[in-house]
């Protein structure tokens, strides 16, 4: 039990480091892009390149970790994070938009491997502790809320080259992550004795009702979050706010995303995963309502907090639901297919963020999201109905 908790804490620390880097990039990525390109529609392309790197590497990363082990994969990903920071520093020195995009692509490789920290926590933990272990690893993002925006803002003017210091901090964080992961020891995965016939065909795994609902809800929640968060710094800059004010809003959003992770697992145990997912959808609708209500600092901060909590409920709920749909022999394909879908949504949303913002503005862009968010309710209700129908014959 003690070793289990220690390994979960190592994974939580690794997640905290990755999320700090991710938040740092979300804070300055669009602004750095704007500094290096005169075309306002291209400012979010560097962040989109990170999503592209994740999409392309996600599936191979999962299958390779099945063979080489989680630790080897996580270290490989973290080395890519260091490379991303170095390339991005050179990009700022050389005023090269292309190099910045390349650096963000390497960040996407790091991100692809880092997405499996939460799954690794579920593999380390005993079944009774699994949901809480996943929540605890995601709670590592609380550190990111405090550290990421601070390092982005402080590093932006640390040197004469704007944002070079921010990317230097990114390299330092990734190096610390490498040291932490050197102490990770994953248990040997044994075959499920009840699975006499081996893994099912991949289509049977991903066509399960629970799997489909977890995938659609998680991918949609992530896509909506990326669309809003990517454009928040640009929108706030447009409305006259400075980087320190923007950084605090990003901090509050990240706190909203990850502070609930300390108790989301318990809420799921008490009320059920579908109830928590429905609550997440309603919180995303409340986020849209606040966005449409005003553009003062208070409205930006409140809206981003609600978006963070809504994302948390959908993401932790979706991950917990997903973990019930596959065996140990099926996890590589099941996890990779889910997370690749999530980041395809993210890639589309990050690529569309700049053009949507420029075409429609902050408020109208969010109004367009309302039908998408409402569409998430039906699959969750369908899953509740499907499970009740499956239980009814057994009761008879």
Image (cartoon, rainbow, N blue to C red):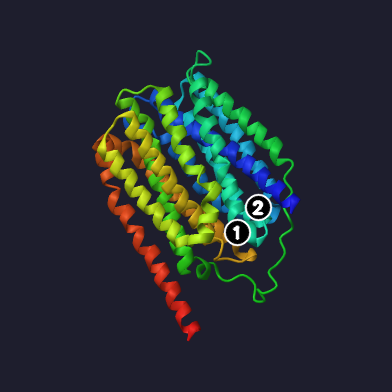
Q: Which mark is residue 105?
A: none
Mark 2, other Cα within 10 Å: few <14 / some 14–19 / many ≥20: some
Q: Which mark is residue 65?
A: 2
- Mark 1 and 2 residues: CB-CB less than 8 Å, in contact? yes
Q: Residue at image x 28%, y 36%?
A: 362
Q: Which mark is residue 332?
A: 1
Q: Residue furthest front?
A: 270
Name the one closer to the observer, 52 or 170: 170
Q: Residue at image x 24%, y 41%?
A: 364
Let me know if residue 233 appears in the view.
yes
Percent across and percent down for residue 291 are 30, 39
The answer to whether 213 is drawn above or below residue 252 in the figure is: below
Q: Residue at image x 30%, y 26%?
A: 238
Percent across and percent down for residue 26 are 46, 34
Q: Earlier in the sequence, mark 1 or mark 2?
A: 2
Name the one closer to the observer, 106 or 142: 142
Q: Secondary structure at mark 2?
A: helix
Residue 156 as seen in the image, left or right of residue 126: left
């Amino acid at each position: 039990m003690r070793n289990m908790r220690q390994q979960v804490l190592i994974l939580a620390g690794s997640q905290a480091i990755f999320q700090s880097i991710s938040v740092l990039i979300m804070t300055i990525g669009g602004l750095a892009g704007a500094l290096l390109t005169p075309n306002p529609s291209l400012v979010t392309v560097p962040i989109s390149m990170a999503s592209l790197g994740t999409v392309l590497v996600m599936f191979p990363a999962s299958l390779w970790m099945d063979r080489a082990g989680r630790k080897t994969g996580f270290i490989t990903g973290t080395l890519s994070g260091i490379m991303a920071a170095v390339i991005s520093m050179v990009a700022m020195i050389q005023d090269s938009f292309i190099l910045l995009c390349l650096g963000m692509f390497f960040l996407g490789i790091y991100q692809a491997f880092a997405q499996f920290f939460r799954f690794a926590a579920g593999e380390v933990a005993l079944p009774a502790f699994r949901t809480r272990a996943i929540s605890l690893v995601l709670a590592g993002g609380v550190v990111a809320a405090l550290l990421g925006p601070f390092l982005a803002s402080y590093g932006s003017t640390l040197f004469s080259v704007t944002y070079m210091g921010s990317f230097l901090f990114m390299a330092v964080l990734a190096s610390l992550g490498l040291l932490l992961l050197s102490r990770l020891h994953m248990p040997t995965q044994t075959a499920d004795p009840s699975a006499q016939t081996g893994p099912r065909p991949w289509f049977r795994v991903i066509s399960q009702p629970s799997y489909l609902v977890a995938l659609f809800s998680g991918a949609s929640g992530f896509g909506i979050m990326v669309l809003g968060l990517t454009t928040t710094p640009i929108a706030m800059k447009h409305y006259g706010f400075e980087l320190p004010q923007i950084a605090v809003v990003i901090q509050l959003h990240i706190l909203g995303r990850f502070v609930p992770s300390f108790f989301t697992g318990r809420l799921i145990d008490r009320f059920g995963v579908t109830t928590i997912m429905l609550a997440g959808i309603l919180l995303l609708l409340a986020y849209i309502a606040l966005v449409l209500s005003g553009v003062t600092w208070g409205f930006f901060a409140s809206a981003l907090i609600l978006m963070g909590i809504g994302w948390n409920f959908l993401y932790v709920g979706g991950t917990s639901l997903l973990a019930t749909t596959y065996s140990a022999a099926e996890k590589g394909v099941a996890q990779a297919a889910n997370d690749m879908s999530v980041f395809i949504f993210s890639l589309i949303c990050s690529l569309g963020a700049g053009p949507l913002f420029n075409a429609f503005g902050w408020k109208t862009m969010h109004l367009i999201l309302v039908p998408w968010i409402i569409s998430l309710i039906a699959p969750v209700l369908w899953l509740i109905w499907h499970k009740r129908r499956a239980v009814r014959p057994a009761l008879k």
